Amino acid sequence: MTTINSVEDVIDALSGNGAVAEMTSASLTAVYNWRAAGKFPADTYLLIQDELRARGRVAPDYLWPMRQPARIMRAKKKKKPTSQTQRTA
């Protein structure tokens, strides 16, 4: 499968703003905004990825900024860096 690495290229690969608007039930203005922002709303992930796969393409997950589960966020907070300075006597 071919990987498409930008929102602009994903939209173009899916036949443009109008087709993506129809596919996602979004307005044309919204799709133009996604293109300008360089990211898709999280709720479009499955719709767009499924259509890309049907066309032999995929896009990286980072094009859809999503929240992480709270348990992952808590684990990240617990892993604070420790100081490696040592006291000399």
Image: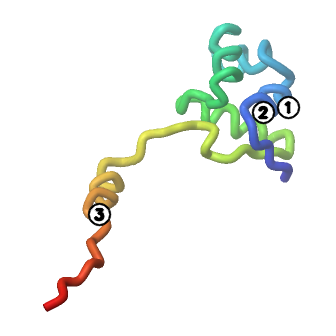
Spatial separation of the CA atoms under disc 1 and disc 2 = 5 Å
Other residues around mark 3 within 10 Å, as few (<14) / some (14–19) / many (≥20): few
Q: Which mark is residue 80?
A: 3
Q: Is residue 68 above or below residue 9?
A: below
Spatial separation of the CA atoms under disc 1 and disc 3 = 42 Å
The amino acid pointed to by label 1 is Ala
Q: Is residue 63 left or right of residue 11?
A: left
Q: Is residue 27 above or below residue 58?
A: above
Q: Quadrant of the C terminus?
A: bottom left
Residue 82 picture location, percent across and down: 27, 71
The amino acid pointed to by label 3 is Lys
Q: Earlier in the sequence, mark 3 or mark 2?
A: 2
Observer-nearest of 2 and 22: 2
Residue 57 picture location, percent across and down: 82, 45
Can the viewer see residue 22 in this picture? Answer: yes
Can the viewer see residue 53 in this picture? Answer: no
What residue is disc 1 on?
A: 13
> Is disc 1 in contact with disc 2, using a CB cutoff of under 8 Å?
yes
Q: How many marks?
A: 3
Residue in view at x 31 percent, y 67 percent: 81
> Is disc 1 in contact with disc 3, using a CB cutoff of under 8 Å?
no
Circle 2 sits in a helix, a strand or a loop, which is it?
helix
Circle 1 sits in a helix, a strand or a loop, which is it?
helix
**Residue ranking furthest to the front:** 89
Other residues around mark 2 within 10 Å, as few (<14) / some (14–19) / many (≥20): many
Circle 3 sits in a helix, a strand or a loop, which is it?
loop
Q: Is residue 73 above or below residue 84?
A: above
Residue 33 picture location, percent across and down: 64, 16
**Residue ranking furthest to the left:** 89
Mark nearer the viewer, 3 or 2: 3
What residue is disc 2 on?
A: 10
Other residues around mark 1 within 10 Å, as few (<14) / some (14–19) / many (≥20): some
